[in-house]
Image: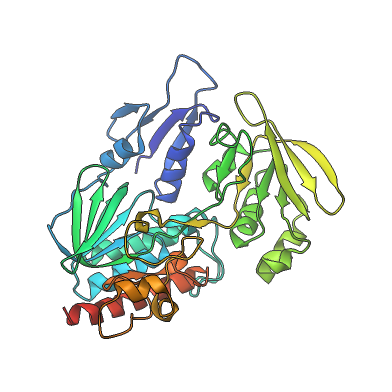
Amino acid sequence: MKKLKLYGNADAPELYPIRDFLKRSVVAFEWIDLNHSADKQPSIEFPDGQLLVNPTLEQIAQNLGWINKPKYKEYDLSIYGAGPAGLSAAVYAASEGLKTVLIEREAIGGQAGTSSLIENYMGFPDGISGAELAERARQQALKFGVEILLLREGVKGTFYDNRIHVDFSNGEQLVAKANICATGVEYARLNLEGEDRFFHKGVYYGAGASEANFCQDKDLFIVGGGNSAGQAASFFSKFAKRVFMVIRRGCLADTLSEYLVKRINSIENIHVLYHSQVTALEGDELLERIRISNTEEGTEIWYETSKLFICIGGKPNTEWASETAICRDVNGYLYTGSDLLGLDKYQSCWDLDRHPYHLETSVPGSFAAGDVRFNSVKRVASAVGEGAMAVTQVHQYLAKL
């Protein structure tokens, strides 16, 4: 089977989202470097010979046959977010006969889809990449009849007539009897001067597995001490000259699974900078150096690098809920079940003679699963379990309509 061909300059900021999207979508492609030729524009060539110059993700997805319009005016269940929780919910819902639609604003797999290797998920003793796990789940969902709407950005959600009505930025509207929010979290920013300027020009959020081949013989830095950062360090160590993990704490074991701690300690070209944080970024057009401050020693050192990956605790994707009756905590996580009972806002908006189901929000028929939920366990297996559990509760809700 012929591969896509992607032409461009490795440092072109507009190409990183494309490489990332293709990698997370498990689409094989051949990279052809234009060697900084100013007269040649980034382009993508499809196996049928069609060539797109300066392509958008929407154009690429359209040519891959992934952009569809909703088939129905109303669904039994709409699921927002195609990470592990959303994919799990989609598979279980459709397999049990619910007319189901799954909406994702970026690539299938969510944050888990960026992981180079997931090793603690049951059934995969050798581990599996987040993208491959998500692709298997996508195929399974399609097999049961799930509609998947990619690259959809919701702008407003309203609840009335026992339905959720969602308006998308492209003008479409979706109506469903019940919904599951599985929108996950985004990686947090460092909030440094120049951070926006270097976005996709040396500063990346997440593990960025698609950049591995562009890190050959370079020093790169990963901010974060969680499993995603640890897996990224292990993965990049096969390509980079040196990998530096920058963590605020003094011990990896505080935030990292033991098997990853042992592995990182055994890889010679991984260096952990404890009690440290990135405090400044510098460069002309691209990132060239970063300053790292050590809070224990009181030192500040500049390091030459063109690759900085930020994998620190994120913010939930719940801004859409700000104008609804859905209750969120101060950080934006969605309250569900018994966590709602003492909240004043819940008391004023919940009018049923039963308490919310375990994964139900303060709006009847609206559920939450995975990392977006208050007090959730941030693991793939937990998200998958919550997705399946949410569908069971959706059935209970729909049975009483």
- Residue 201: x %, y % from top left: 56, 33
- Residue 351: x %, y % from top left: 26, 78
Image: 233 above or below 85: above
Q: Residue at 64% across / 48% down in the picture? A: 236
Colouring chosen for the image of the structure: rainbow
Image: 386 above or below 322: below
* Image quadrant where one finds the N terminus: top left
Q: Quadrant of residue 307?
A: top right
Compared across the picture, whether 228 is left or right of 20 comes to right
* Image quadrant where one finds the C terminus: bottom left
Image: 19 above or below 99: above
Compared across the picture, whether 58 is left or right of 303 comes to left
Mark yes or no: residue 374 visible: yes
Q: Quadrant of residue 279?
A: top right
Compared across the picture, whether 338 is left or right of 179 comes to right
* Residue lying at the far left of the rendered structure: 73
Q: Residue at 60% across / 48% down in the picture? A: 310
- Residue 374: x %, y % from top left: 47, 70
Q: Quadrant of residue 306?
A: top right
Picture mark count: 0
* Residue lying at the far top of the rendered structure: 39
Image: 159 above or below 387: above
- Residue 42: x %, y % from top left: 42, 26
Q: In front here: 309 or 138? A: 309
